[in-house]
Amino acid sequence: VLHLAPHKLSGHNVCPKATAGCSAACLNTSGHGTYPSVQKGRIAKTLRLFNDRERFISDLEWDIGALIRKATREDLTPAVRINGTSDLPWLAIKMAERFPSVQMYDYTKILHTLKKPLPGNYYLTFSKSEDNLDECVEALRLGFNVSIVFRKVPETYLGFPVINGDEDDLRFLDPLGFIIGLSAKGRGKKDQSGFVVDV
């Protein structure tokens, strides 16, 4: 998983559809993201993407190549999530086309990306924020799954069955026609914007 500094934290917006709720509840502040050194590293990577894109892409390609070599040695299938804390489908599509043997997957709030032809090895899950419920319904109608952050993950929501997305992050293995339920993490546990859904 590639983690950049989300939204405008670096001075460059890597989350064009960010809302106040998702910015406040971003998983950027969970796990290792609580450490200042990790935050500095994410900002540095994001600045390199904007200030020295050629080097950034070269480094990313090297990292993915190393993952492929490791996966080959261990007889595993490499999987990469380019947008761990960003929403730049163009970058993931570029890498998916460059590495067709790698399973790429992401979450996105950019609905029009779902309407474009995507590489066969790039799997997208649409994400709900506090103000895009209509787009979530459209994404489900287009045949994509939708992830929703819940205070407590239910069995069904909006008439759709819910998969517990906290059990693993292998979204490309999910059956279609489901809501992916995620529990609030980090600062998201205190969210009152409507981003975190109470059932």
Image (tube, helix red, strand yellow):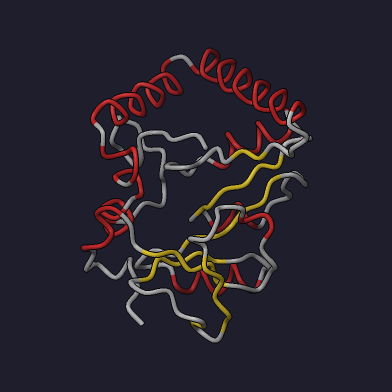
Q: Residue furthest front?
A: 74
Q: Is residue 191 above or below residue 134?
A: above
Q: Position of residue 60 (x, y in %)?
A: 57, 22
Left or right: 21, with 98 as reference point: left
Left or right: 87, with 13 as reference point: right
- The quadrant of the picture occupied by the C terminus is bottom left
Q: Position of residue 50 (x, y in %)?
A: 43, 22
Q: Is residue 66 above or below residue 139?
A: above
Quadrant hosting residue 9: top left
Residue at position x 34%, y 44% in the image? 31
Q: Is residue 13 above or below residue 145?
A: above
Residue at position x 41%, y 52% in the image? 17
Q: Position of residue 38 (x, y in %)?
A: 32, 29
Residue at position x 64%, y 65% in the image? 144
Residue at position x 43%, y 67% in the image? 132
Quadrant hosting residue 177: bottom right
Left or right: 189, with 46 as reference point: left
Q: Position of residue 136 (x, y in %)?
A: 51, 69
Is 9 in front, or is 172?
172
Is 64 in front, or is 119?
64
**Number of marks:** 0
